[in-house]
């Protein structure tokens, strides 16, 4: 099992999950955050602190959010960042790039 960040994080990026994650498996993109599925240890701390309920365990994802499994995984692949398995989020692994689905997502109004 892994945790997945979904569309509720787009244009919000509260980042409480970054501080809660004990293994630094949450990375910052331009409009949202992404969880590296191979680095996540399934502790669930990120889910408990997310103020917009954007984080879900993969085995409890509502069907309409299932594409976010691939979106989080593909963010680290050659079509987006090319980071592969960076081994933990740090300043070198922060980008303005996003998965194409996120990049094309309609902007969220400020304050929502």
Image (tube, rainbow, N blue to C red):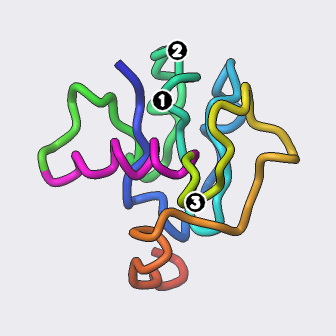
Q: Quadrant of residue 79?
A: bottom right
Q: Looking at the image, is mark 2 or mark 1 nearer the viewer?
A: 1
Q: Quadrant of residue 73?
A: top left
Residue 65 among magenta residues: yes
Q: CA distance from mark 2 to mark 3?
A: 23 Å
**Residue range highlighted in magenta:** 64-76
Task: Decide: is 81 above or below 107.
Answer: above
Q: Residue at image x 39%, y 59%?
A: 8
Q: Secondary structure beneath disc 2?
A: loop
Q: Is 80 positioned to the left or the right of 44 in the image?
A: right
Could you say which disc has been placed on residue 37 in the image?
1
Q: Residue at image x 50%, y 42%?
A: 50
13 or 68: which is nearer to us? 68
Name the chief secondary structure element in magenta. Answer: helix
Q: Is 47 positioned to the left or the right of 78 in the image?
A: left
Q: Secondary structure beneath disc 1?
A: loop
Could you say which disc has been placed on residue 41 in the image?
2
Pointer 3 local density, CA inside 10 Å: few below 14, some 14–19, many at least 20? few
Q: CA distance from mark 3 to mark 1?
A: 16 Å
Residue for badge 3:
80
Comes first in the chain, label 2 or label 3: 2
Q: Is 59 positioned to the left or the right of 57 in the image?
A: left
């Amino acid at each position: 099992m892994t945790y997945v960040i979904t569309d509720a994080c787009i244009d919000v990026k509260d980042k409480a999950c970054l501080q809660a994650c004990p293994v630094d498996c949450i990375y910052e993109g331009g409009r949202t955050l992404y969880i590296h599925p191979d680095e996540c240890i399934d502790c669930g701390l990120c889910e408990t602190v997310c103020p917009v309920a954007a984080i879900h365990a993969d085995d409890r994802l509502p069907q309409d959010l299932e594409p976010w499994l691939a979106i989080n995984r593909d963010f680290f692949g050659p079509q987006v960042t090319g980071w592969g398995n960076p081994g933990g989020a740090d300043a070198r692994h922060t980008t303005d790039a996003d998965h194409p689905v996120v990049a094309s997502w309609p902007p969220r109004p400020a304050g929502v």
